[in-house]
Image (cartoon, grey):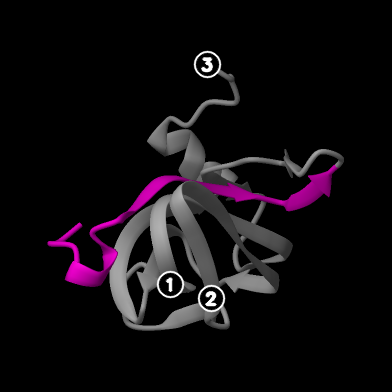
């Protein structure tokens, strides 16, 4: 991440999760279903019916958040969220959840998940997408550690 813009000095991204779905439970708790960091499929291209990207923020202030996923060559966005305004009271936190439907990953590779704050790049995470044969070559594991 490059230098943080002056307007975001009071904002910290604590974590980013990729998952199938997010639900709001009793007591204002979030339940995350199908948390993942890699997409391993039988064949490509593949369309993912539903994808949620969760950003957990701490700090204070009012911000405009956007999430987009770029192709591995960074040349084309495959999905872009609508800008969403969120506000954090002093010493507070906020969860920003972007839902996408029918996301098509055309080829294998490391897709770039970008989070923008106030239209400026704030963070990047990689999402590895491959078919089963390539995943075996790379050495991914089904084990949960």
Q: Which residue is mark 3?
A: 145
Residue most extreme to the right: 26
Q: Is residue 9 left or right of residue 30?
A: left
CA gap between label 2 and label 1 equals 6 Å
* For residue 96, above or below residue 63: above
Name the one closer to the observer, 60 or 38: 60
Q: Which mark is residue 63?
A: 1
Labelled pair 2, 1 in contact (Cβ < 8 Å):
yes
Dot 1 alpha-carbon crowd within 10 angstroms: few under 14, some 14 to 19, many 20 or more = some
The magenta-colored residue range is 1-25
* For residue 45, above or below residue 80: above
Q: Residue at 58%, 53% (x, y): give it.
A: 95
Q: Residue at 33%, 59% (x, y): give it.
A: 124
* For residue 39, above or below residue 66: above
CA gap between label 3 and label 2 equals 36 Å
Q: Which residue is mark 2?
A: 85
Q: Residue at 52%, 45% (x, y): give it.
A: 38
Q: Nearer the viewer, mark 3 or mark 2?
A: 2
Dot 2 alpha-carbon crowd within 10 angstroms: few under 14, some 14 to 19, many 20 or more = few
Name the one closer to the observer, 53 or 129: 53
């Amino acid at each position: 991440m490059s230098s943080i813009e002056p307007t975001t000095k009071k904002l910290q991204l604590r974590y980013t999760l990729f998952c199938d779905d997010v639900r709001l439970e009793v007591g204002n708790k979030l339940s995350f279903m199908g948390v993942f960091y890699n997409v391993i499929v039988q064949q490509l291209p593949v369309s993912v019916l539903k994808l949620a990207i969760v950003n957990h923020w701490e700090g204070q202030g009012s911000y405009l958040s956007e999430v987009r996923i770029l192709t591995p060559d960074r040349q084309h966005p495959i999905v872009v969220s609508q800008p969403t305004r969120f506000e954090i009271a002093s010493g507070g936190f906020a969860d920003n959840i972007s839902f996408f439907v029918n996301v098509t990953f055309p080829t294998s590779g490391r897709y770039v998940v970008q989070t923008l704050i106030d239209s400026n790049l704030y963070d990047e995470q990689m999402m590895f997408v491959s078919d089963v044969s390539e995943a075996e070559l790379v050495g991914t594991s089904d084990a949960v550690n």
